[in-house]
Amino acid sequence: MGLFATPLLDDRVVLVNGGSQGVGAGIVRAAVREGATVVFTGRRAEVGEKLAADTGADFVQADLADPAQASGSVTETVSRHGRIDCLVNAAGLTSRGSLLDTTPELFDAHMAVNLRAPFFAMQAAVADMKGRGAPGTIVNIGSNCAHGGPPHLAPYSAAKAGLAGLTRNAAHAHRWDRIRINGLNIGWTDTEGEDTVQRTFHGAGDDWREKAAAAQPMGKLGQVDEIADFVVLLLSARSGVVTGSVIDWDQTVLGGLD
């Protein structure tokens, strides 16, 4: 249980796509702690099965680059638990590519995971919610790269910008269905995946976290548990009527200049 006397997601069925590691895994743990029945997806069976054993959540192996598997994650959740109340799209592909060196294959891979998968998972989730005449909540995990991003993340930035637009479009379309849809544009976050990225693409050493943290205004990188708690709040009734918001969860202030 979190800060509140009643678990925030008590009696809610929550699907976390891309929930087997990193931010997604943090959201799985937080949602379970707040009383939800949780289903999560991931590509690697051994990682997903371990998290399922640790948390009691249901693991569904899925490659979200396949739109049938993205929508199928919702179908499987409904099959197991009768409904879906909350959806989190947390899967993300962060492989590097600039405007000049990105291949069509790399571009398509980013669009498939970072934009198309959330689209079709939302399509299936909203269909279930509307079909039951029930309210629901969706949170899309975006990136501050949606505002532009560094040169080496061109296809990633393009996909996350599209996700921000999709979030607002879907929220507007389904507000009268009482389905709230919001996004979280997260900044530089300390995850095991980021550790791999820093070592693989940027030649980082064992002290990269300390160096990166020292260069941040708050003296640390974004933390998974803090993001997870914020996502749970957005999924819950405690966030009230908020919908169509794409929140910058970062230490950089857009438009701020020194």
Image: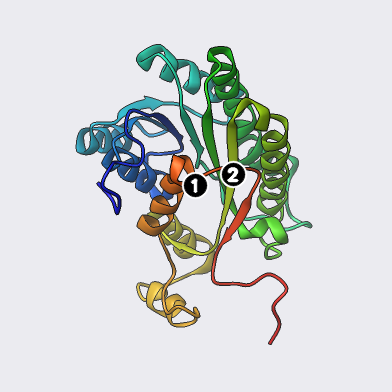
Q: Which numbered dot is residue 32? A: none
In this rendering, the answer to whether 210 lies above or below 35 is: below
Q: Is residue 30 left or right of residue 180?
A: left
Along the line of sight, which residue is nearer the eye, 239 or 207? 239
Disc 1 target residue: 239
SS at mark 1 in the image: helix
Q: Nearer the viewer, mark 2 or mark 1?
A: 1
Give neighbour class at mark 2: few <14, some 14-19, many 20+ (Cα, 10 Å). Answer: many
- Residue at 54%, 66% in the rendered image: 250
Disc 2 target residue: 182
In this rendering, the answer to whether 174 lies above or below 141 is: above
Q: Residue furthest bottom?
A: 258
Residue 66 visible here: no
Q: Amino acid at mark 1?
A: Ser
Q: Quadrant of residue 253?
A: bottom right
- Residue at 53%, 26% in the rendered image: 135
Q: Is residue 35 left or right of residue 85?
A: left
Q: In x, y percent, where is residue 33?
A: 27, 42
Along the line of sight, which residue is nearer the eye, 92 or 46? 92
Mark 2 vs 1: CB contact within 8 A: yes
Query: Which tag, 2 or 1, sits closer to the chain's start?
Result: 2
Give neighbour class at mark 1: few <14, some 14-19, many 20+ (Cα, 10 Å). Answer: few
Spatial distance from mark 2 to mark 1, Cα to Cα? 11 Å
Q: In x, y percent, where is residue 21?
A: 37, 45
Q: Amino acid at mark 2?
A: Asn
Q: Quadrant of residue 58?
A: top left
- Residue at 29%, 34% in the rendered image: 46
Q: In x, y percent, where is residue 240?
A: 52, 44
SS at mark 2 in the image: strand
